Image: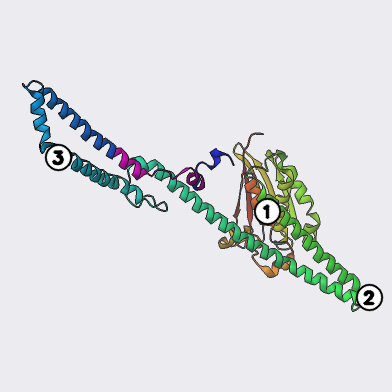
Amino acid sequence: MSEVEGAGRPEAVDAAGAAPSLSGRILRSVLTFTIGGIVLLTLMFAGIFYATMMQVPNSAAVMADFFGGDLTVCVVATLIVGVALAFAVSRALTVSIVRPLDEVDPADPWKVPVYAEMRPLLARIDSQQRTLRAQNEELARAESLRRDFSANVSHEMKTPLQVISGYAELMENGLVPPEDVPRFAGLIHQESQAMRALIDDVLTLSRLDELPPDAAVIASVEVLGVAQRAAGRLTKLADERAISVQVKGAPVTMMGNEGLMEQMLHNLIENAIRYNDEGGHVWVEVDGSSEGVTVQVADDGPGIPEAKREKIFERFYRLEKSRSKETGGTGLGLAIVKHGAQRHGGTIEVGGKEGEGATFTLFFPATAE
């Protein structure tokens, strides 16, 4: 460690000697000024007296008689008393000056009156205190989210693992009739795919959490084409539930991450299909303007209650857990959408009336390409 790095540390001060205190400096300054003033005045009066006495005949004898008596004792005593008074006054003045500094509470700098010269320093201390408190609260919140996320992931993984383990054990011990083996194997495959999807979503969220806010803006993306590809990947699921999916709009280009954008739209369209009524409709519309790019994904399903529209973006939150088990999904799709929107500097809002469908609106502000 260099001398510069250690100069401000207590151990460095102790090694070099105790640092002078502010009160000590003030006391020495005031005391030096006061005693110096007394000495200066004494010398000045002595000079005036000497010059005056030199005009008197036999001045040497007169001055000897004058200073040879009790006057010398009085002058010395007066000087000693003056120095003592100077020390006492200096001490009292120093205490009075330093008291407002001693009363400053770093946790609440504005609790007591302070000198005007101290206000910039205390304002900075107060700002740093608020920043530290906010950072501590954010760290505590992040730690709480991390614990909850770990617990939820463990819980979500436990269910498919139990199913896979149970069915595999039955098959291993020969307790499954031959005609039921394909069905059991299908269930094992289905649960393993659910676990794989969960792991993929967890990894995606972890990567998003580690990215800086603007790290997703990396290349030019044609949003309408991305929406069409995302919808095309869900054709089989839509056909199984007799859901009509329509993608419309004009080709719009923006700066972003094409892979992440496709996953976001895939998650929104998939949710609109899974949680829609059979035979329903899903509309995807892409629109661009000078302000930015808007993508809407709407359906005519049961909709989302207003009281729960903020919670649906929480990790593993489900409106109806029983129905979510039937329709599938990891409970992380909308969390990925929200984080992806934030990484693009955008927003996502939920609209629609309960019982008449839901509308998810993604907005990405215009950026220079």
Left or right: where does residue 136 sit relative to residue 209? left
Q: Of the two numbered discs 1 and 2 on the same chain, state the one appearing first in sequence.
A: 2
Is 116 within the magenta?
no
Amino acid at circle 2 = Pro
Give the magenta range. 11-30
Find the distance from the CA under tag 2 to the CA under tag 3: 127 Å
Q: Quadrant of the C terminus?
A: top right
| Residue 163 horizontal/vertical position (percent) | 80, 71
What residue would you read off at disc 3? 73
Please say whether residue 206 is visible from this viewpoint: yes
Label 1 to label 3: alpha-carbon separation = 93 Å
Within 10 Å of disc 3 (Cα), the crowding (few <14, some 14-19, many 20+) is: few
Q: Quadrant of residue 354?
A: bottom right
* C-alpha span from label 1 to label 2: 42 Å
Q: Secondary structure at mark 2?
A: helix
The amino acid at mark 1 is: Ile
Asked whether 150 or 227 is in front, the reply is 150
Choose mark 2 or mark 3, whichever is in front: 3
Q: Residue at x 9, y 26 (%)?
A: 61
Q: At 79% from the left edge and 58% from the top edge, which residue is drawn?
A: 237
Residue at numbered disc 2: 178
Residue of label 1: 336
Q: Secondary structure at mark 3?
A: helix
Q: Crowding near pointer 2: few (<14 within 10 Å), some, many (20+)?
A: few
**Considering the numbered disc 1 on the image, is that residue within a helix, a strand or a loop?**
helix
Q: Identity of the amino acid at label 3?
A: Val
Magenta residue check for 20? yes
For discs 1 and 3, the disc positioned in front in the rendered view: 3
Q: Name the residue located 27 percent from the left edge and 35 percent from the top edge.
A: 33
